Image (spheres, rainbow, N blue to C red):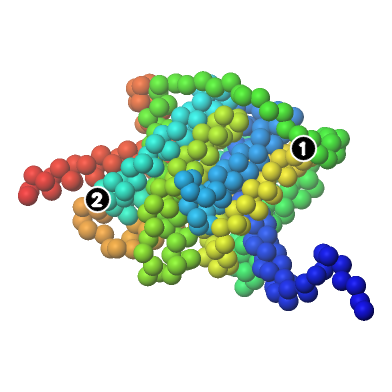
Protein backbone atom coordinates (compact mmCIF):
# COMPACT_ATOMS: atom_id res chain seq x y z
CA UNK A 1 0.00 0.00 0.00
CA UNK A 2 1.41 3.37 -1.00
CA UNK A 3 1.81 6.22 1.42
CA UNK A 4 0.42 9.63 0.50
CA UNK A 5 2.15 12.61 2.05
CA UNK A 6 -0.21 15.09 3.78
CA UNK A 7 0.79 17.88 1.44
CA UNK A 8 -0.04 15.73 -1.60
CA UNK A 9 -3.33 14.26 -0.40
CA UNK A 10 -5.01 15.56 -3.51
CA UNK A 11 -3.67 15.34 -7.01
CA UNK A 12 -2.23 18.52 -8.49
CA UNK A 13 -4.82 20.52 -10.38
CA UNK A 14 -4.37 20.14 -14.13
CA UNK A 15 -5.18 23.83 -14.51
CA UNK A 16 -2.23 25.26 -12.60
CA UNK A 17 0.12 25.47 -15.61
CA UNK A 18 -2.48 27.54 -17.45
CA UNK A 19 -2.86 29.83 -14.44
CA UNK A 20 0.91 30.20 -14.19
CA UNK A 21 1.13 31.06 -17.88
CA UNK A 22 -1.63 33.65 -17.49
CA UNK A 23 0.18 35.26 -14.56
CA UNK A 24 3.44 35.25 -16.51
CA UNK A 25 1.66 37.08 -19.33
CA UNK A 26 0.47 39.72 -16.83
CA UNK A 27 4.01 40.10 -15.48
CA UNK A 28 5.43 40.42 -19.01
CA UNK A 29 2.86 43.10 -19.80
CA UNK A 30 4.00 44.95 -16.68
CA UNK A 31 7.58 44.76 -17.94
CA UNK A 32 6.50 46.15 -21.32
CA UNK A 33 4.67 49.09 -19.74
CA UNK A 34 7.62 49.84 -17.46
CA UNK A 35 9.93 49.68 -20.48
CA UNK A 36 8.02 52.21 -22.55
CA UNK A 37 7.52 54.44 -19.50
CA UNK A 38 11.26 54.62 -18.84
CA UNK A 39 11.48 57.17 -21.66
CA UNK A 40 9.46 59.60 -19.50
CA UNK A 41 12.34 59.71 -17.00
CA UNK A 42 13.64 62.33 -19.41
CA UNK A 43 11.28 64.82 -17.72
CA UNK A 44 12.79 64.72 -14.20
CA UNK A 45 16.26 64.71 -15.77
CA UNK A 46 15.43 67.93 -17.65
CA UNK A 47 13.95 69.58 -14.54
CA UNK A 48 16.89 68.46 -12.39
CA UNK A 49 19.39 69.92 -14.82
CA UNK A 50 17.33 73.12 -14.99
CA UNK A 51 17.70 73.37 -11.21
CA UNK A 52 21.48 73.02 -11.51
CA UNK A 53 21.82 69.37 -10.47
CA UNK A 54 24.66 67.22 -11.80
CA UNK A 55 26.58 64.10 -10.87
CA UNK A 56 25.56 62.44 -7.62
CA UNK A 57 22.88 65.05 -6.87
CA UNK A 58 21.18 64.41 -10.22
CA UNK A 59 21.48 60.65 -9.74
CA UNK A 60 19.82 60.92 -6.31
CA UNK A 61 17.02 63.00 -7.87
CA UNK A 62 16.49 60.37 -10.58
CA UNK A 63 16.51 57.61 -7.95
CA UNK A 64 13.73 59.40 -6.09
CA UNK A 65 11.88 59.77 -9.40
CA UNK A 66 11.90 55.97 -9.72
CA UNK A 67 10.41 55.69 -6.25
CA UNK A 68 7.74 58.26 -7.19
CA UNK A 69 6.73 56.13 -10.18
CA UNK A 70 6.45 53.08 -7.94
CA UNK A 71 4.23 54.93 -5.46
CA UNK A 72 2.04 56.54 -8.13
CA UNK A 73 1.40 53.26 -9.94
CA UNK A 74 0.67 51.50 -6.66
CA UNK A 75 -2.05 54.08 -6.00
CA UNK A 76 -3.60 53.35 -9.40
CA UNK A 77 -3.48 49.61 -8.66
CA UNK A 78 -5.47 49.92 -5.43
CA UNK A 79 -9.12 49.03 -5.12
CA UNK A 80 -11.75 51.74 -4.51
CA UNK A 81 -11.94 54.40 -3.19
CA UNK A 82 -8.72 55.19 -5.09
CA UNK A 83 -8.05 52.83 -7.99
CA UNK A 84 -10.22 52.90 -11.09
CA UNK A 85 -10.29 49.12 -11.47
CA UNK A 86 -8.88 49.43 -15.00
CA UNK A 87 -5.35 49.28 -16.39
CA UNK A 88 -4.22 52.91 -16.11
CA UNK A 89 -0.43 53.14 -15.61
CA UNK A 90 1.08 56.44 -14.51
CA UNK A 91 4.31 58.08 -15.68
CA UNK A 92 6.02 61.44 -15.79
CA UNK A 93 4.48 63.75 -18.33
CA UNK A 94 5.01 66.92 -20.32
CA UNK A 95 1.92 68.30 -18.59
CA UNK A 96 4.07 69.36 -15.65
CA UNK A 97 7.24 70.14 -17.58
CA UNK A 98 6.84 73.85 -18.41
CA UNK A 99 5.68 75.09 -15.00
CA UNK A 100 8.18 72.82 -13.22
CA UNK A 101 11.07 74.29 -15.22
CA UNK A 102 9.81 77.79 -14.39
CA UNK A 103 9.64 76.87 -10.70
CA UNK A 104 13.18 75.46 -10.93
CA UNK A 105 14.35 78.82 -12.35
CA UNK A 106 12.52 80.87 -9.73
CA UNK A 107 13.17 78.87 -6.57
CA UNK A 108 15.12 75.74 -7.44
CA UNK A 109 13.83 72.34 -6.34
CA UNK A 110 12.04 73.38 -3.12
CA UNK A 111 9.64 75.48 -5.20
CA UNK A 112 9.16 72.59 -7.67
CA UNK A 113 8.27 70.24 -4.81
CA UNK A 114 5.93 72.69 -3.09
CA UNK A 115 3.99 73.63 -6.22
CA UNK A 116 3.80 69.99 -7.34
CA UNK A 117 2.29 69.09 -3.97
CA UNK A 118 -0.20 71.95 -4.34
CA UNK A 119 -1.16 70.85 -7.86
CA UNK A 120 -1.68 67.27 -6.71
CA UNK A 121 -3.99 68.43 -3.92
CA UNK A 122 -5.90 70.58 -6.40
CA UNK A 123 -6.37 67.65 -8.80
CA UNK A 124 -7.52 65.40 -5.96
CA UNK A 125 -10.09 68.04 -4.99
CA UNK A 126 -11.25 68.33 -8.62
CA UNK A 127 -12.03 64.61 -8.67
CA UNK A 128 -15.11 65.33 -6.53
CA UNK A 129 -16.54 67.49 -9.31
CA UNK A 130 -15.65 65.40 -12.35
CA UNK A 131 -19.29 64.79 -13.31
CA UNK A 132 -19.97 68.52 -13.49
CA UNK A 133 -16.74 69.17 -15.35
CA UNK A 134 -17.53 66.36 -17.79
CA UNK A 135 -20.90 67.85 -18.72
CA UNK A 136 -19.63 71.44 -18.87
CA UNK A 137 -16.45 70.84 -20.89
CA UNK A 138 -16.63 69.61 -24.50
CA UNK A 139 -14.42 66.76 -25.67
CA UNK A 140 -12.70 69.17 -28.06
CA UNK A 141 -11.40 71.10 -25.05
CA UNK A 142 -9.85 67.92 -23.64
CA UNK A 143 -8.33 67.20 -27.06
CA UNK A 144 -6.81 70.68 -27.08
CA UNK A 145 -5.14 70.03 -23.72
CA UNK A 146 -3.69 66.75 -24.99
CA UNK A 147 -2.48 68.50 -28.15
CA UNK A 148 -0.77 71.20 -26.07
CA UNK A 149 0.86 68.56 -23.85
CA UNK A 150 2.41 67.04 -26.97
CA UNK A 151 3.46 70.46 -28.22
CA UNK A 152 5.24 71.21 -24.95
CA UNK A 153 6.86 67.81 -25.13
CA UNK A 154 8.20 68.39 -28.64
CA UNK A 155 9.40 71.95 -28.07
CA UNK A 156 11.30 70.89 -24.95
CA UNK A 157 12.81 68.01 -26.91
CA UNK A 158 14.12 70.17 -29.74
CA UNK A 159 15.59 72.57 -27.20
CA UNK A 160 17.44 69.67 -25.59
CA UNK A 161 18.81 68.55 -28.96
CA UNK A 162 19.82 71.94 -30.38
CA UNK A 163 20.45 73.78 -27.14
CA UNK A 164 19.69 77.43 -26.47
CA UNK A 165 23.11 78.93 -27.24
CA UNK A 166 22.64 80.22 -30.78
CA UNK A 167 26.25 81.39 -31.03
CA UNK A 168 27.83 78.09 -30.02
CA UNK A 169 25.63 75.06 -30.83
CA UNK A 170 26.86 71.65 -29.70
CA UNK A 171 27.24 69.68 -32.92
CA UNK A 172 27.86 66.39 -31.13
CA UNK A 173 24.59 66.65 -29.19
CA UNK A 174 22.71 67.46 -32.39
CA UNK A 175 24.17 64.46 -34.25
CA UNK A 176 23.53 62.07 -31.36
CA UNK A 177 19.98 63.38 -30.96
CA UNK A 178 19.33 62.98 -34.68
CA UNK A 179 20.66 59.39 -34.64
CA UNK A 180 18.53 58.47 -31.63
CA UNK A 181 15.41 60.02 -33.14
CA UNK A 182 16.14 58.36 -36.49
CA UNK A 183 16.43 54.96 -34.79
CA UNK A 184 13.07 55.49 -33.09
CA UNK A 185 11.39 56.43 -36.37
CA UNK A 186 12.85 53.43 -38.21
CA UNK A 187 11.73 51.04 -35.46
CA UNK A 188 8.26 52.55 -35.49
CA UNK A 189 8.01 51.89 -39.24
CA UNK A 190 8.77 48.16 -38.88
CA UNK A 191 6.04 45.54 -38.92
CA UNK A 192 7.18 44.04 -35.64
CA UNK A 193 4.82 44.99 -32.81
CA UNK A 194 7.65 44.56 -30.29
CA UNK A 195 9.90 46.96 -32.21
CA UNK A 196 7.18 49.58 -32.28
CA UNK A 197 6.36 49.21 -28.59
CA UNK A 198 9.98 49.60 -27.52
CA UNK A 199 11.00 52.11 -30.22
CA UNK A 200 11.59 54.96 -27.73
CA UNK A 201 13.56 52.83 -25.25
CA UNK A 202 15.68 51.15 -27.95
CA UNK A 203 16.29 54.48 -29.67
CA UNK A 204 17.55 55.93 -26.38
CA UNK A 205 19.92 52.97 -26.01
CA UNK A 206 21.22 53.57 -29.55
CA UNK A 207 21.68 57.26 -28.80
CA UNK A 208 23.43 56.46 -25.50
CA UNK A 209 25.85 54.13 -27.30
CA UNK A 210 26.58 56.80 -29.91
CA UNK A 211 27.06 59.41 -27.19
CA UNK A 212 29.52 57.13 -25.40
CA UNK A 213 31.48 56.64 -28.63
CA UNK A 214 31.49 60.42 -29.18
CA UNK A 215 32.77 61.10 -25.67
CA UNK A 216 29.58 62.74 -24.40
CA UNK A 217 29.39 59.99 -21.77
CA UNK A 218 32.82 59.77 -20.19
CA UNK A 219 34.62 56.90 -18.53
CA UNK A 220 34.32 58.80 -15.25
CA UNK A 221 30.53 58.74 -15.59
CA UNK A 222 30.50 54.98 -16.09
CA UNK A 223 33.00 54.44 -13.24
CA UNK A 224 30.73 56.37 -10.89
CA UNK A 225 27.86 54.02 -11.74
CA UNK A 226 30.05 50.95 -11.16
CA UNK A 227 31.35 52.17 -7.80
CA UNK A 228 27.96 52.56 -6.14
CA UNK A 229 26.46 49.48 -4.42
CA UNK A 230 24.19 47.22 -6.41
CA UNK A 231 21.38 47.60 -3.89
CA UNK A 232 20.76 50.33 -1.34
CA UNK A 233 17.69 51.61 0.47
CA UNK A 234 16.97 55.23 -0.57
CA UNK A 235 17.49 57.83 2.13
CA UNK A 236 14.04 59.02 3.14
CA UNK A 237 13.80 62.64 4.20
CA UNK A 238 10.99 65.11 3.70
CA UNK A 239 12.41 67.64 1.22
CA UNK A 240 12.21 71.36 1.69
CA UNK A 241 9.15 72.85 0.03
CA UNK A 242 8.48 76.43 -0.99
CA UNK A 243 5.41 78.14 -2.43
CA UNK A 244 4.92 81.20 -4.61
CA UNK A 245 1.58 82.91 -5.19
CA UNK A 246 2.63 83.80 -8.72
CA UNK A 247 2.70 80.09 -9.61
CA UNK A 248 -0.61 79.09 -8.03
CA UNK A 249 -2.70 79.73 -11.16
CA UNK A 250 -0.30 78.01 -13.63
CA UNK A 251 -0.07 74.90 -11.46
CA UNK A 252 -3.84 74.89 -10.90
CA UNK A 253 -4.33 74.98 -14.67
CA UNK A 254 -1.86 72.10 -14.96
CA UNK A 255 -3.82 70.17 -12.31
CA UNK A 256 -6.98 70.71 -14.36
CA UNK A 257 -5.23 69.55 -17.53
CA UNK A 258 -3.93 66.46 -15.72
CA UNK A 259 -7.43 65.64 -14.46
CA UNK A 260 -8.89 65.91 -17.96
CA UNK A 261 -6.14 63.75 -19.43
CA UNK A 262 -6.52 61.13 -16.69
CA UNK A 263 -10.27 60.97 -17.23
CA UNK A 264 -9.73 60.47 -20.95
CA UNK A 265 -7.26 57.65 -20.27
CA UNK A 266 -9.75 55.82 -18.03
CA UNK A 267 -12.46 56.07 -20.68
CA UNK A 268 -9.94 54.78 -23.24
CA UNK A 269 -9.18 51.78 -21.00
CA UNK A 270 -12.90 51.16 -20.42
CA UNK A 271 -13.63 51.05 -24.14
CA UNK A 272 -10.84 48.53 -24.74
CA UNK A 273 -11.88 46.40 -21.75
CA UNK A 274 -15.66 46.48 -22.21
CA UNK A 275 -15.97 47.18 -25.92
CA UNK A 276 -16.69 50.39 -27.78
CA UNK A 277 -20.41 50.12 -27.04
CA UNK A 278 -20.02 49.60 -23.29
CA UNK A 279 -21.36 52.22 -20.91
CA UNK A 280 -18.65 54.43 -19.45
CA UNK A 281 -18.03 54.12 -15.71
CA UNK A 282 -17.67 57.73 -14.61
CA UNK A 283 -17.21 56.74 -10.95
CA UNK A 284 -14.08 54.84 -11.97
CA UNK A 285 -12.79 57.96 -13.72
CA UNK A 286 -13.32 60.00 -10.54
CA UNK A 287 -11.39 57.46 -8.48
CA UNK A 288 -8.55 57.39 -10.98
CA UNK A 289 -8.29 61.20 -11.01
CA UNK A 290 -8.22 61.12 -7.20
CA UNK A 291 -5.39 58.56 -7.28
CA UNK A 292 -3.52 60.65 -9.85
CA UNK A 293 -3.82 63.76 -7.68
CA UNK A 294 -2.65 61.89 -4.60
CA UNK A 295 0.24 60.53 -6.70
CA UNK A 296 1.41 64.03 -7.66
CA UNK A 297 1.02 65.24 -4.09
CA UNK A 298 3.11 62.26 -2.98
CA UNK A 299 5.71 63.18 -5.61
CA UNK A 300 6.02 66.62 -4.04
CA UNK A 301 6.39 65.11 -0.56
CA UNK A 302 9.04 62.62 -1.72
CA UNK A 303 10.96 65.14 -3.80
CA UNK A 304 9.89 64.63 -7.41
CA UNK A 305 7.81 66.17 -10.20
CA UNK A 306 4.17 65.57 -11.06
CA UNK A 307 2.80 62.42 -12.65
CA UNK A 308 -0.14 61.72 -14.92
CA UNK A 309 -1.62 59.14 -17.28
CA UNK A 310 1.02 57.45 -19.44
CA UNK A 311 0.39 58.27 -23.10
CA UNK A 312 2.75 55.47 -24.18
CA UNK A 313 0.86 52.98 -22.03
CA UNK A 314 -2.41 54.04 -23.64
CA UNK A 315 -1.00 52.99 -27.02
CA UNK A 316 0.42 49.77 -25.60
CA UNK A 317 -2.94 48.96 -24.03
CA UNK A 318 -4.66 49.24 -27.40
CA UNK A 319 -1.93 47.32 -29.24
CA UNK A 320 -1.58 44.40 -26.82
CA UNK A 321 -5.17 43.95 -25.69
CA UNK A 322 -3.92 43.05 -22.17
CA UNK A 323 -6.37 44.82 -19.83
CA UNK A 324 -5.72 43.05 -16.50
CA UNK A 325 -5.34 45.79 -13.90
CA UNK A 326 -2.81 43.68 -11.96
CA UNK A 327 -0.31 44.78 -14.61
CA UNK A 328 -0.05 48.11 -12.75
CA UNK A 329 1.05 46.23 -9.63
CA UNK A 330 3.94 44.69 -11.55
CA UNK A 331 4.84 48.12 -12.96
CA UNK A 332 5.00 49.52 -9.42
CA UNK A 333 7.17 46.58 -8.32
CA UNK A 334 9.61 47.04 -11.20
CA UNK A 335 10.14 50.73 -10.44
CA UNK A 336 10.47 50.00 -6.72
CA UNK A 337 13.25 47.52 -7.50
CA UNK A 338 14.97 50.04 -9.79
CA UNK A 339 14.76 52.63 -6.99
CA UNK A 340 16.80 50.23 -4.84
CA UNK A 341 19.55 50.13 -7.49
CA UNK A 342 21.64 53.34 -7.28
CA UNK A 343 23.66 52.28 -10.33
CA UNK A 344 20.55 52.47 -12.51
CA UNK A 345 19.91 56.04 -11.35
CA UNK A 346 23.54 57.01 -12.07
CA UNK A 347 23.31 55.63 -15.60
CA UNK A 348 20.02 57.40 -16.24
CA UNK A 349 21.51 60.68 -14.96
CA UNK A 350 24.29 60.47 -17.54
CA UNK A 351 21.93 60.32 -20.54
CA UNK A 352 22.99 63.27 -22.74
CA UNK A 353 20.52 66.09 -23.51
CA UNK A 354 20.44 65.14 -27.20
CA UNK A 355 19.18 61.63 -26.40
CA UNK A 356 16.67 62.96 -23.89
CA UNK A 357 15.44 65.42 -26.49
CA UNK A 358 14.95 62.69 -29.09
CA UNK A 359 12.70 60.78 -26.68
CA UNK A 360 10.67 63.92 -25.96
CA UNK A 361 10.16 64.69 -29.65
CA UNK A 362 9.23 61.09 -30.49
CA UNK A 363 6.65 60.69 -27.72
CA UNK A 364 5.35 64.22 -28.25
CA UNK A 365 4.48 63.43 -31.86
CA UNK A 366 1.99 60.74 -30.83
CA UNK A 367 0.44 62.92 -28.15
CA UNK A 368 -0.04 65.77 -30.63
CA UNK A 369 -1.81 63.54 -33.16
CA UNK A 370 -3.94 62.01 -30.41
CA UNK A 371 -5.10 65.47 -29.45
CA UNK A 372 -5.88 66.35 -33.07
CA UNK A 373 -8.04 63.23 -33.41
CA UNK A 374 -9.97 64.06 -30.25
CA UNK A 375 -10.52 67.67 -31.32
CA UNK A 376 -11.94 66.66 -34.70
CA UNK A 377 -13.79 63.40 -33.99
CA UNK A 378 -17.22 65.07 -33.73
CA UNK A 379 -16.68 67.65 -36.44
CA UNK A 380 -16.11 71.30 -35.63
CA UNK A 381 -18.72 74.02 -35.50
CA UNK A 382 -17.67 77.54 -36.40
CA UNK A 383 -17.58 78.61 -32.74
CA UNK A 384 -15.55 75.57 -31.70
CA UNK A 385 -13.12 76.02 -34.60
CA UNK A 386 -12.60 79.66 -33.58
CA UNK A 387 -11.98 78.73 -29.93
CA UNK A 388 -9.49 75.98 -30.78
CA UNK A 389 -7.74 78.00 -33.49
CA UNK A 390 -7.13 81.07 -31.34
CA UNK A 391 -6.01 78.94 -28.37
CA UNK A 392 -3.50 77.04 -30.52
CA UNK A 393 -2.19 80.22 -32.15
CA UNK A 394 -1.81 81.87 -28.73
CA UNK A 395 0.16 78.91 -27.40
CA UNK A 396 2.44 78.96 -30.46
CA UNK A 397 2.86 82.73 -30.23
CA UNK A 398 4.29 82.54 -26.71
CA UNK A 399 6.92 80.04 -27.89
CA UNK A 400 7.78 81.77 -31.17
CA UNK A 401 7.65 85.43 -30.10
CA UNK A 402 9.98 86.13 -27.14
CA UNK A 403 8.83 89.77 -27.24
CA UNK A 404 5.54 88.69 -25.66
CA UNK A 405 7.32 87.67 -22.46
CA UNK A 406 9.67 90.63 -22.67
CA UNK A 407 6.84 93.20 -22.68
CA UNK A 408 4.44 91.31 -20.39
CA UNK A 409 4.04 92.61 -16.81
CA UNK A 410 5.98 90.57 -14.27
CA UNK A 411 2.74 89.60 -12.52
CA UNK A 412 1.51 87.55 -15.48
CA UNK A 413 4.82 86.01 -16.60
CA UNK A 414 4.03 82.71 -14.82
CA UNK A 415 0.89 82.43 -16.97
CA UNK A 416 3.13 82.50 -20.05
CA UNK A 417 5.38 79.71 -18.76
CA UNK A 418 3.99 76.96 -20.95
CA UNK A 419 1.87 76.48 -24.09
CA UNK A 420 -0.43 74.31 -21.97
CA UNK A 421 -1.16 77.14 -19.56
CA UNK A 422 -1.56 79.77 -22.29
CA UNK A 423 -3.75 77.58 -24.49
CA UNK A 424 -5.93 76.33 -21.65
CA UNK A 425 -6.58 79.81 -20.25
CA UNK A 426 -7.29 81.22 -23.72
CA UNK A 427 -9.66 78.38 -24.62
CA UNK A 428 -11.46 78.60 -21.26
CA UNK A 429 -11.97 82.35 -21.68
CA UNK A 430 -13.31 81.96 -25.22
CA UNK A 431 -15.55 79.07 -24.21
CA UNK A 432 -17.02 81.18 -21.42
CA UNK A 433 -17.65 84.07 -23.82
CA UNK A 434 -19.37 81.73 -26.30
CA UNK A 435 -21.54 80.22 -23.56
CA UNK A 436 -22.58 83.69 -22.33
CA UNK A 437 -23.32 84.75 -25.92
CA UNK A 438 -25.48 81.66 -26.42
CA UNK A 439 -27.42 82.49 -23.24
CA UNK A 440 -27.87 86.05 -24.47
CA UNK A 441 -29.20 84.85 -27.83
CA UNK A 442 -31.63 82.55 -26.06
Residue nearest the observer in this picture, 383 or 322: 322
Residue nearest the observer in this picture, 209 or 269: 269
Q: Hey, which residue is sitting farthest front in the picture?
A: 1
Residue nearest the observer in this picture, 219 or 58: 58
Q: Quadrant of residue 354?
A: top right
Residue nearest the observer in this picture, 40 or 292: 292
Nearer to us of marks 2 and 1 is: 1
Circle 1 crowding by C-alpha within 10 Å: few under 14, some 14–19, many from 20: many
Coordinates of residue 146 in the picture (x, y in percent):
42, 50
- The reply to whether residue 221 is in sight is no
Q: Could you tell me which residue is drawn at 64 percent across and 57 percent down?
A: 30
Residue under circle 1?
Answer: 342
**Could you say whether the residue bearing mark 2 is in a helix, strand or loop?**
helix
**Could you say whether the residue bearing mark 1 is in a helix, strand or loop?**
helix
Could you tell which of marks 2 and 1 lies nearer the N-terminus?
1
Circle 2 crowding by C-alpha within 10 Å: few under 14, some 14–19, many from 20: some
207 left or right, relative to 115 = right
Residue under circle 2?
Answer: 386
- Residue 263, compared with residue 171, is above or below; it is below
Q: Could you tell me which residue is drawn at 62 percent across and 52 percent down?
A: 329
- The reply to whether residue 53 is in sight is yes
- Residue 390, compared with residue 375, is above or below; it is above
Q: Hey, which residue is sitting farthest right in the picture?
A: 1
- Residue 281, compared with residue 401, is above or below; it is below
Q: Could you tell me which residue is drawn at 45 percent across and 42 percent down?
A: 290
Q: Could you tell me which residue is drawn at 71 percent across and 40 percent down?
A: 339
Figure quadrant of the N terminus = bottom right
Q: How far apart are marks 2 and 1 (CA)?
A: 51 Å
Coordinates of residue 2 in the picture (x, y in percent):
91, 77
Coordinates of residue 15 in the picture (x, y in percent):
70, 74
Amino acid sequence: MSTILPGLATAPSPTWPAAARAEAAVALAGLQHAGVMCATLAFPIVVGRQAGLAGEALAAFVGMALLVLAAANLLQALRPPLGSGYLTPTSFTATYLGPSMLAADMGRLPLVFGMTFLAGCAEAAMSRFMDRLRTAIPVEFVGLIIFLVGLTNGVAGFRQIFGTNLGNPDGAQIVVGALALGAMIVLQCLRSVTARLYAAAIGMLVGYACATAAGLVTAADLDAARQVPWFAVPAFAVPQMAFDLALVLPFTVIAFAAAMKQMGFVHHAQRITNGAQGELDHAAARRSVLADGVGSATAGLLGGIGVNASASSAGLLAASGMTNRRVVGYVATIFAVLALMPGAAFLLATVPPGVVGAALVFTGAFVVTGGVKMMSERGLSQDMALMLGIAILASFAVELCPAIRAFAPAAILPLLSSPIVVGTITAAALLLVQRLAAIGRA
